[in-house]
Image (cartoon, rainbow, N blue to C red):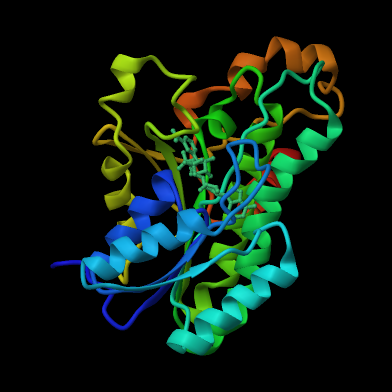
Amino acid sequence: MTIRFDGRVAIVTGAGNGLGRVHALGLAARGAKVVINDFGGARDGKGGSSEAALKVVEEIRAAGGTAIANGANVTDFEQVKAMVEQAKAEFGRVDVLINNAGILRDKTLSKVEMADFQAVVDVHLMGAVYCTKAVWEIMREQNYGRILMTSSASGLFGNFGQSNYAAAKMAVVGFMNALSIEGKKNDIRVNTIAPIAATRMTNDVLPEAMLERIRPEQVTPAALFLVSENAPTKTILSAGGGVFTATQLVDTAPVYFSDKELSPEALEANFAKIANWNTARPYADSNAQVQALIEKAIKSMQA
Ligand code: NAD
């Protein structure tokens, strides 16, 4: 069935450029009323103007869609709360939040200034936290909400020179994990996208030939699916160049050591058995994982 967003209101952060822009255009083209948030800064998060957001609003209106611009800096909770109030005043509800705003301040840990580490964590993690917190009660009252976090392969798998960015991008996965559970009873579904696309963020870190093949428009269908009515929850999709993968945290089968056997040397000797990825599985929540460990301990002690 065609995925539509008629009657739905969506907020997309960092929607003045790159991926956020095409996510917003996609939502509007399928009937959503969209808040185009962007504080209009440079790639490192410095500066700011409302021009980028206004341009996207004009583009949506020219195509017959409905959108308003908002210049909130997502690292400022007061501005974020005002953005959500603006959305409610203008459109009456908030159904979809795409936490997409992002900056880069790449440096190895030995060279990075703490202020640059903090700035990256503030935008990616705290920006997502503030926006989500500001829409959460609205979504709970509506018994409907779709929230998308934007992670990155850098956070999921690691990348040289991006410890600030990687830490923040993995943090939003933890945020999703908890919220997907807290949101269940009010039909709030929370997912994560890990995009790969040619934008100003990647235009000097990826080779030219590769950039031509990874257009932001190829990522947006995954974002739209993950905020649609029938979206899954607690799902991580990687998307780039028309290719999609699902990513999951998994845990190996528990291995027990009695007090007599237990030592650092025993762990070294049995490491391959513990890290036997053939036994790996995901867990629905932390209780399930803790329970599996404790059950194994109790059973092994009784044996
Ligand atoms: P982009 O620089 O083109 O767009 C990011 C937008 O976010 C900009 O318009 C910027 O003004 C806005 N923004 C930054 N800080 C903000 C703030 N504090 N408040 C409001 N708006 C703010 O970059 P992009 O590539 O489109 O990135 C979008 C998201 O995708 C980011 O979270 C990024 O980390 C993530 N991502 C992108 C790639 C990729 O390959 N492009 C890969 C992995 C993750």
In front of the other: 178 or 275: 178
- Give the residue at the far left of this rendering: 1
**Residue 139, placed above or below residue 245:** below
**Residue 5, placed above or below residue 22:** below
In front of the other: 297 or 219: 219
Residue 162: percent from left, percent from top: 65, 25
In front of the other: 259 or 267: 267
> Which residue is found at the position 52% from the left and 85% from the top?
88
> Which residue is found at the position 67% from the left and 75% from the top?
81
In-image side of 234 versus 7 (left or right): right
In-image side of 272 versus 197 (left or right): right
Q: Quadrant of residue 299?
A: top right
Total numbered labels placed on residues in the image? 0
> Which residue is found at the position 83% from the left and 36% from the top?
115
User: What quarter of the picture does the N terminus occupy?
Assistant: bottom left
Residue 294: percent from left, percent from top: 71, 48
Residue 229: percent from left, percent from top: 32, 72
User: What quarter of the picture does the C terminus occupy?
Assistant: top right
Residue 226: percent from left, percent from top: 36, 58
Confirm whether residue 289 shows in the render.
Answer: no
Confirm whether residue 189 shows in the render.
Answer: yes
**Residue 223, placed above or below residue 158:** below
In front of the other: 242 or 53: 53
In-image side of 147 versus 290 (left or right): left
